[in-house]
Amino acid sequence: MQYTLKKSLGQHFLKDENTSRKIVSVLQQNLTESGVHQLLEVGPGAGALTKYLLQLPGINFKAVELDTEKVAYLENTFPTIKDKIIHKDFLDINVPFEDTFIVAGNFPYNISTQIVFKVLEWKEQVPVMLGMFQKEVAQRIASKPGTKVYGILSVLTQAFYSVEYLFDVPPGSFTPPPKVVSGVIQLKRLNEKFNMRNEKDFFILVKTAFNQRRKTLRNAVRGLFDASILKNEIFNKRAEQLSVENFAALTFEMR
């Protein structure tokens, strides 16, 4: 059974077996260490990872796939997957398991940042996320303060997860080859949470600060603080110079 590639869905299918095995090996280690037995694959596509994930012993596995043609292909190629596919857009689904689960996948590039934000909504149930992104996005998620790519995605992710950039994946590992290098990263939920007034204020502060990242913090977030607080030296800095801990601490000073 054949399938077609759909650019509109950001489809670039992994064909390099070595890369698939490396990802699955890291995933197995996480499953073992965390004691989690439930796994969600996002965007299985032609099944490069799926064929290995279905073989993992004692794992309750589900996959989310939007493309009807790929669902048919997967069910035909891997009969054991039949009742394990959620045929929907990942961004529209409800939490797929009642208890803790791990999220993994070769994520569709066109919605990869939205996938991360959705997982952040589920963070109490997702101790680990392992996946492939466009390298530029992977670097943004993993970047540290003081770098040009450090931004909203970096801070909001690192407030709840430690991020490790694992390895590059070259364009030739995919069909069709993307025009960019890809990167595999691992997110592990932090044991110690950052001390913040509440998550809503934290999200508002981070987004407001970076929406005008060229301005000093004082000018970018003026509407969120009283004038007396804005005299503090930290407001002389720009958003990219603040750590996650800095942002969390500032939430207690907000109006």
Image (cartoon, grey):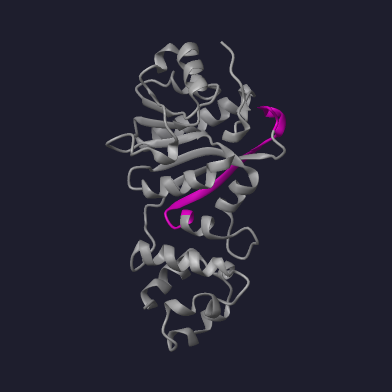
Residue 124 part of the magenta segment? no
Residue 185 seen in render: no
Residue 166 part of the magenta segment? yes
Q: Residue at x 33, y 65 (%)?
A: 198
Left or right for 59, reference 179: left
Q: Position of residue 46 (x, y in %)?
A: 55, 21
* Number of marks: 0
Q: Is residue 159 above or below residue 13?
A: below
Q: Residue at x 64, y 62 (%)?
A: 147
Q: Position of residue 179 (x, y in %)?
A: 72, 38
Where is the C terminus found, in terms of image quarters?
bottom left
Q: Is residue 103 above or below residue 247?
A: above
Q: Nearer the viewer, residue 236 or 204?
A: 204
Q: Quadrant of residue 12?
A: top right
Q: Position of residue 77 (x, y in %)?
A: 50, 12
Residue 203 seen in render: yes
Q: Residue at x 41, y 65 (%)?
A: 202
Range drawn in magenta? 157-177
Q: Nearer the viewer, residue 200 or 20?
A: 200
Q: Position of residue 15 (x, y in %)?
A: 63, 23
Q: Quadrant of residue 194?
A: bottom left
